[in-house]
Image: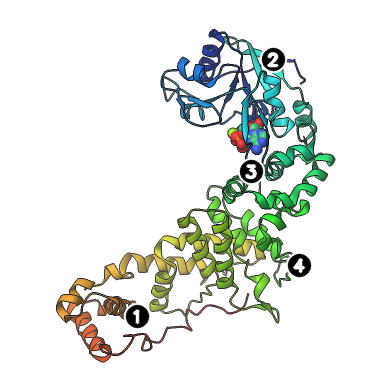
Amino acid sequence: MHDGDALEISLPGPVSAVLSGLIAGGDEAALVGGCVRDLLRGERPLDWDVATSAPPEAVAARFPGATWDNRFGTVTVRPTDPGTGPGGAEAGIEVTTYRVEGGYRDRRRPDEVRWGRSLIDDLARRDFTINAMAWLPDDLGGGSGRLVDPFGGAADLEAGVLRAVGNADARFTEDALRLVRAVRFAARFNLEIDPSTDAAIRRAAPSAASLSGERVRDELLRVLGGAEPPSSALLTMERLGLLQVLLPELAALRGVPQSKALAGDALDHSLRAADALSPEDPVLRLAGLLHDLGKATTLADGHFIGHESAGADLAEAVLRRLRVPRAATARVARLIRQHMFAYTPEWSDAAVRRFVRRVGVDLLDDLFALRAADNVASGAREPAHGGTAELGERCRAAIAGDPLEARHLAVSGHDLVSELGIPPGRLIGRLLDRLLEAVLEDPAQNRRERLLGLARGWAAERVGEAGGFDDGAPAHHQGDDGVAASS
Ligand code: ATP
Ligand code: MG
């Protein structure tokens, strides 16, 4: 397939309607970017992007209900009959006026997007040849048209090559995100990076430090959410010097020795853990990728004492830098903090309840999935009996039958205030914590009068002492559910 060759496409109705609406108004309109690439690869595109010579106001005026709300002049046209559009078309078709980019003040975003005069201008500003192709319709009814491929994207796709459009050094200087996108597309489509593009990426790699956390995050999550094992993109990032700039905490695991059934260092292990998790949940894959970050800083005498907590802190800092939303960051950090649990069938029921309480009911399944991935990545096998599956069963039984959270207690904070005459405040919180510990130890204690009696006794001991329970906190139960101290 070459520039100018005839190419027939079976267009979804709404896409065809948008193209024909633009053409009927006397403008040029073409399919551009990822959808043309996907069609040439024989895949059904997820979204269909249209480029046109019509200015944004004219596009918006032509399609009732279209929204035009960003400074790049992209108009989103919604199909009039939603539900009929195939994949993505229901969500709206993006129509962008031909543009060229000029004036780059920094490496973040093009400062100025100017409307271009031609489709060729528009393709020339795109990142890689495989993303810089268009399809110009001849006869929309019959789906016939021509491939517009001035940079040889179809031949590169055929040969399995990822190549920057035009001068690679210039393209990466314009927008450093293209460095990461290169790796993502190469891994996703199993392409070799063309040697001169590859060399330009290495030269420009340090400039990736200037990228905003949000943009790096979005690319990283797309890598982790892809069907390809993420290790492929991440190893390429390491080879090109990007991992060291964007995720230095992870790159630092290279060379950290492991004594696992599978060969390799702590970075190899981390990549295998990410690969072993599902792309359906990219945030959980992130937890797999980062779960052993603490090993770079805690290695001593062949052990990694406290690496789960050092790693949780490091992961939190990484994810804050990448502007990952708070809830996802907290989820990853909590999983990493808890990932070293060492279950044995000797655990008492109370130990199982304390484990559920510590991990949180909402995170148990994730933690077991992370353990399974960690095992795969280590070459470790669960025992046929008495392993994590048994712990899971026992946790489920506890969740179904036992009080495990403060809200399950037979008394509330209000009860303590009114029955014991203690003012609302820290002491009430401490009493509730301690009551919960008593109930986790023995659920039979969870009766109103019994708990009020316990709380009354503790309050009498402690009220008036500076700091309340600060130094009198009950001994923490360790041992049967204690966390293993080494790797
Ligand atoms: P995906 O299936 O991952 O969405 P895509 O090719 O559609 O792949 P997008 O990020 O949606 O990728 O971008 C759409 C098109 O816009 C690309 O195909 C490319 O032509 C162009 N593009 C996107 N980002 C850039 C960039 N940073 N620099 C140059 N061109 C870009
Ligand atoms: Mg896209």
The tag on residue 255 is 4
The tag on residue 146 is 2
Residues under numbered marks 2 and 1 in contact, where contact means CB atoms less than 8 Å apart: no
Structural distance between the alpha carbons of marks 2 and 4: 52 Å
Structural distance between the alpha carbons of marks 2 and 1: 73 Å
The residue at 74%/37% (across/down) is 171
CA neighbours of label 4 inside 10 A, class few (<14), some (14 to 19), many (20+): few
Answer above or below: position of 129 versus 302. Answer: above
* Three-letter amino acid code of the residue under disc 3: Arg
**Could you tell whether 235 is left or right of 10 in the image?**
right
Residue 450, located in which quarter of the rendered image?
bottom left
The residue at 61%/45% (across/down) is 219
Residues under numbered marks 3 and 1 in contact, where contact means CB atoms less than 8 Å apart: no
Residue on which disc 3 sits: 108
Q: Quadrant of the N terminus?
A: top right
Identify the element where label 4 is drawn: loop
N-terminal-most mark, 2 or 4: 2
Answer above or below: position of 397 versus 39. Answer: below
Structural distance between the alpha carbons of marks 3 and 4: 33 Å
The tag on residue 441 is 1
Residue 412 visible in rendering? no
